[in-house]
Amino acid sequence: MADAGFDRVDAYIDAHLEHYVDELSQLCAQPSVSAQDWGMGECADLVADLLRRHGAEAEQFETGGNPIVVARIGGRSDRTLLFYNHYDVQPADPFDLWTHPPFEPTVRDGKLFARGARDDKGEIIARIAAVDALADSCGGQLPCSVLFVIEGEEEISSPHIAAFVQDHADMLRCDGAVWEEGGIARDGNPVLPLGVRGILEVELMVRTLSRDAHSGTAHLLPSAAWRLVWALSTLKGPDERIRIPGFYEYALAPSEQDLALLDGLAERNPQFAEQLRRLYGNRGFVAGHDNRDLQRSVFTPTCSIDGMGSGYQGQGSKTIVPSTAMAKLDFRLVPDQDPHEIYGKLRRHLDDQGFQDVEMRMLGWMRPARMDPDDPLVRLTVRTGREVYGGEPSIVPLIGGSSPAYAFAETLGTPVVTAGVGYWDNCDHAPDEHVRIADLRNGIRHIARILAGFGSI
């Protein structure tokens, strides 16, 4: 179907866009913060009911955590396209930095403001709307079957999705998948990531005393804060190299094709470094990277201290020797690095450095995943993105973030692409998260075109 043949699809979207914004508002008004176990069951029920209202056969599956909603709509061909999404959202704190309350969706200046408006409830509504619009133009029957898989734990590293996919592989069998997010770059053209980094999230804990002590005893009693600082200092040096033995052993280097794609991104956006400086206020970049190296550095695994806590942190002074200290870390891992192997290497490293007393707890993990740039689904997504947005999509071989794409790509052996409603400044995970209504419309149009072409590729 040529792009001109989508006139009826686009007309349907325009005629019903306000309705879909209303449905998105209803979905965002229901809190679903997985990190705080807030509203999860209620939101799963709402998602299942929403899918049924749009003609899907929906079912909830219990896990060791939050329910997973699976829904199917049949089509003419024997091919199936899977939509992966999540109904959980990030905590909305700090609430006082929101212009409007995060769970009271508000439309202003062509944008819908709410927690989850983009990540990821906006994407859920966009896929439902695309199915509706295409079914309307095809006499009520889609060109291929559609399978929705919508989980409630993505924001806490999806601890149950991999086992769920393995246990239900026959039910979830598909020929391709569209992932939970996507959108456009600063130039207004779509971005197509083909890979995600893995992640290992760890908490370290030190206890040196049964209770805090007067700092007048600091010459006698060991400080948990210093003990943790010394342990952390062994993990990474000022050169940014991670000092855990064997950490880089299986880290896959970028291919020539990867480097060419990354260098192309640098050429398309020569102001990338300056844009980051304006956004974050930083003077320089890790390892002194310039614009070209900033793009290439995504193939560098990382060790981040996400948070630390010990002793007194209130107003004024309290002179103590802290009895406990903790730090939360995450390691972003590149293809071929395994989070469980890295966890074992971290434990051995701390032991070898004399920190056997530092306790470790794994908080979450996901493996890296990569897609073939020449896969037919990738080519279809690029072509239809070009038709919708009028410019050349940016193909990104690997992004810095993580997702459970591996659970589907590995178990089901299916290609995974992205197409969505985002743009570079949606304020995802931050106060004033929002989706632009125009981006919601174009995201629906793009998904509809992918779905229309998927039945025959």
Image: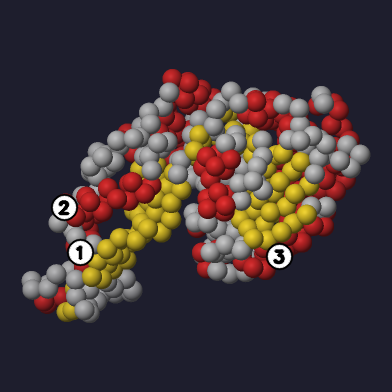
Which numbered dot is residue 357?
1
Near mark 2 (Cα within 10 A), the count class, few <14, some 14-19 or many ≥20, is: few
Look at the numbered disc 3 and give the secondary structure of its residue: helix
N-term mark: 1 or 3: 3
Residue 44 higher or lower than 329, as above or below: below
Q: Position of residue 245 (x, y in %)?
A: 23, 42
Look at the numbered disc 2 and give the secondary structure of its residue: loop
Q: Are marks 3 and 2 in contact (CB under 8 Å)?
A: no
Q: Are marks 2 and 1 in contact (CB under 8 Å)?
A: no
Q: CA distance from mark 3 to mark 2?
A: 50 Å
Specify the amino acid type for callout 1: Asp
Look at the numbered disc 1 and give the secondary structure of its residue: loop
Label tally: 3
Residue 431 lies in quadrant: bottom right
Residue pointed to by mark 3: 45
N-term mark: 3 or 2: 3
Please indicate, yes or no, whether residue 186 appears anywhere in the rendered image.
Answer: no
Residue 89 lies in quadrant: bottom right
Q: Position of residue 142 (x, y in %)?
A: 82, 39
Residue pointed to by mark 2: 353
Residue 437 higher or lower than 260, as above or below: below
Residue 226 higher or lower than 290, as above or below: below
Q: CA distance from mark 1 to mark 3?
A: 45 Å
- Residue at 50% from the left image edge and 34% from the top image edge: 370
Q: Is residue 366 left or right of residue 115?
A: left
Q: Nearer the viewer, residue 119 or 377?
A: 377
Specify the amino acid type for callout 3: Asp
